Amino acid sequence: MLHDKEYQMWPDARLLEQLRLDDRKAFEILYHKYSSKLFYAAYNLFRDKDVCEDLVQELFIDLWTKRNQLNITSLEAYLKVAIRHRVLFYLRTKKASVDLTVIETLVEKYSADSKLFQDDIAHLLEDGVAQLPEKCRQIFTLSRKEYLSNKEIAARLNISIKTVENQITIALRYLRTGLTDYLPSVVALLLLHVFGK
């Protein structure tokens, strides 16, 4: 009888061989090795613990179900693609909404080494901002580009703080809607960056 420590020393290829032979212990080792990484990649986008846990669980259930037919050369690469497909499918079916500020944060975090990617996303956001009504655009720009507080914006423009809050909400809603068509490709690129780390 093999001990856990022996299994954990094995490379993925050997664990996959055992998995094809219905070895539950090999499956458990693979699950523990990859599930949290897959979970956090999805959670970075959704901020919905239950959704992310479900997506990871479904992926591993699928892996176990298809274990006898598996023809995987690199398990890590397979899992990256599989979770990306699940995330994109979830987005396309409109079951989940991606937080625009999370997208911005991830772009800054993961695309420092990819100037072209960063420029593409920045361009999409700028196009969206340019489409906003003038007052809304002005308030949003003061908030996001000049980093003024709602109180400072209200004082500068001689309007109420409530008006500032409302206009920023409108701007974010508009930008989310405008970016919906681009989200699947943005998310796919981001997931590549997330898993590349």
Image (cartoon, rainbow, N blue to C red):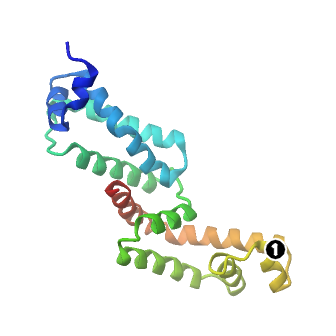
Q: Where is residue 38 in the image (x, y as percent from the top left)?
A: 38, 45
Q: Position of residue 34 (x, y in %)?
A: 33, 39
Horizontal arrangement in the rendering, residue 156 relative to residue 181 (left or right): right
Q: Residue at x 40, y 51 (%)?
A: 87
Q: Position of residue 139 (x, y in %)?
A: 71, 80
Q: Nearer the viewer, residue 180 or 22?
A: 22
Question: Quadrant location of the N terminus?
Answer: top left
| 126 is higher (above) or lower (below) than 170 | below
Q: Residues within 10 Å of mark 1 (few under 14, many from 20)?
A: some
**Quarter of the figure with residue 121:** bottom left
Horizontal arrangement in the rendering, residue 13 relative to residue 128 (left or right): left
Q: Residue at x 76, y 70 (%)?
A: 166
Q: Nearer the viewer, residue 112 or 47?
A: 112
Q: Nearer the viewer, residue 125 or 149?
A: 149
* Numbered label tally: 1
Q: Which residue is drawn at 40% across and 69% down?
A: 111
Q: Which residue is drawn at 52% across and 64% down?
A: 105
**Quarter of the figure with residue 145:** bottom right
Q: Position of residue 109 (x, y in %)?
A: 46, 64
| 143 is higher (above) or lower (below) than 67 | below
Q: Is mark 1 on a helix, strand or loop?
A: helix
Horizontal arrangement in the rendering, residue 153 relative to residue 143 (left or right): right
Which residue position is annotated with label 1? Answer: 151
Q: What residue type is labelled 1?
A: Lys
| 26 is higher (above) or lower (below) than 197 | above
Question: Quadrant location of the C terminus?
Answer: bottom left
